[in-house]
Image (cartoon, grey):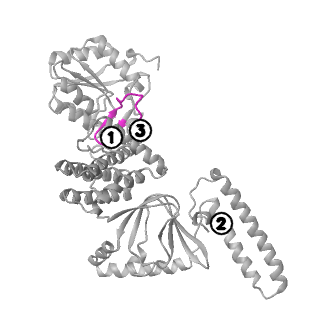
Amino acid sequence: MSDFDLQSMDKVVAFIGEADDQVRKELRQILNHAGVKQVSAHGSLSNLSKLIAQVPPDLLILADDLDPGVFDFIRDIRHNKIGTNPFVLITTLIAPNHVEAVKRAMQAGTDDIIIKPVKEEQLLQRLKRVTVNRAAFVVTSDYLGPDRRAKSRPSAIRRINVLNTMLEKANGRDVDLNTIRDAVEGSMNEVLQARLDSHGYRLGFVCNLILEAYESNQITEEVQGKLEVLVDLLRDAAKTAERLEERELALLCGSLSRDVSSIAERYATPTPKDIDLIKKLSRAVVSAVKPRTPPDKLDQETRQAADVYQQRDRTSFGAASEIHRSPGEAPVVAMDEPIIEILPLAKGQFLFRQGDPPTSAYILNSGAIGIFKESDGKRIPVARVKKGEFFGEMAIIDSRPRRNSAMALEDCTLSLVSKEMIEDKLAASDPLVRTVLHMLSNSLRMVHDAYAPKGRSMSDSVREIREQARHIRAYLESAAEAAVRKEGAEVAQKVVKLSEDLAKLIESVPDLDRRTPALPSEKDLGG
């Protein structure tokens, strides 16, 4: 990027928002002298807003006194509510006596701030510096914009390298609307995921503040305010998860927001169950957002984020500002079906056993669950439940005992959907719908009785061969003809031994086949 030259900016599109006619004219002339030929200057925010909705600029220069809503305008651009490029390079010009405006511009997500009056050499040097050395973006619950943190400060918040069309065009590259749209769409997934990460960490910090207040019996209206912060964070997390098509996470966060809202209404007299929910809340959300992160690393990242908030003396927070995947998208409504309880389950712990009466259905928020049938002292794999899957409902629908056992294959977090809630929903449904559900449930049970699980990974296939070889050996050992019984059983035993050797070889090289097994292994199940 050393060949970057402000004189090669003839493809750059720049918009200026400045109320003063003379200053507006001077800014246009400065950009024209630098080679920017496509400059549109406006004295009102409404005109600028209409233009940005139609044409994506590469550079936006805004005066803080253009309009009282100028900082909300910047924030809306960053949150993808206005225009097609939330990552446009923005420079804000601040009047020398507007001290508070500096902070507001930074909080809105501007790239650079210049104090008026603006000199030509100063503006061009600053534009060159911010274009070439543009800071990566960070996303928190109430901020999307350049990372202004000290580089030496540790943080669990991810940094995102975003689209910089000004640099691309200044280096002679063609950037059309489709290129911008594709780049923004790719970055928005990462932005939304980073927003979820941030929500999880902030939830942990606010939960700790609330628990400290309850433990020290300092229960004031501030506690209610912090509970309402949790509700706001959870609702935004639900909408963000919905935009990422993480439906189960959206359900979890929406349901928790409803539960915490109820706690906020009776904040002065919480029940033990309320306190327990607040204790589990942050871990449930963070582990659901980052399911593959080991629990000890999750705890470390959460503590680190909490320490950062503590150092900044953050005891109050602004409302979460929604990030849109694209401007003009349909409103996203947070789901708020009540989920009664969050359940952490340690690796090796049973969720339910074969023959148990059903009490809940489950949504797996993180980890993996092994489903297996227990027969003659053996554990026969049936299925492997992955993050986001809903299971355990069939026994509730037909009111029969559990036909299989379920065990945590790794540390898990689950949301429990109570039997009473499901029964209430069924009771409120059409009688024909209930009849069809019961028929489907009976049909599925018959299918499960004859079910041969279909594998998808190499380890699944080898286990299937081994099981079939064992069945064949057992059958041949009971054959009437002595010759068939002896020779056939010996051959079958060789196949069994070969499949066992193959299984050990595959398990010794985990990266040989990266596909997730559809079935839990005997080792997973303790068999």
The picture places residue 333, in percent across and down from the top left corner, at: 26, 55
Q: Residue furthest front?
A: 216
Along the viewing direction, whichever of 96 and 367 lies nearer the viewer: 367
State the separation of the CA atoms marked 3 and 1.
10 Å
> What label does residue 158 carry, if any?
3
- Residue 397 position, x and y percent, is 38, 78
Mark number for residue 310? none
Find disc 1 in the rendering and name its residue: 140
In terms of secondary structure, where does tag 2 sit? helix
Picture quarter containing residue 74? top left
Disc 3 element: loop
**459, 220: nearer the viewer:** 220
Q: Would you say residue 46 sits in the magenta stretch?
A: no
Q: Is residue 408 left or right of residue 324?
A: right
- Rendering coords of residue 286 (x, y %): 39, 50
Would you say residue 144 sits in the magenta stretch? yes
Residue at the spot of label 2: 463
Q: Earlier in the sequence, mark 3 or mark 1?
A: 1
Number of other residues with Cα within 10 Å of mark 1, as a class: few under 14, some 14 to 19, many 20 or more: many
What residue sits 70% from the left and 59% below the top? Answer: 504
Name the dominant secondary structure of the magenta segment: loop
Amino acid under disc 1:
Thr
Type of amino acid under label 3: Arg
Q: Specify the segment rendered in magenta.
A: 138-156
Question: Residue type at mark 2?
Answer: Arg
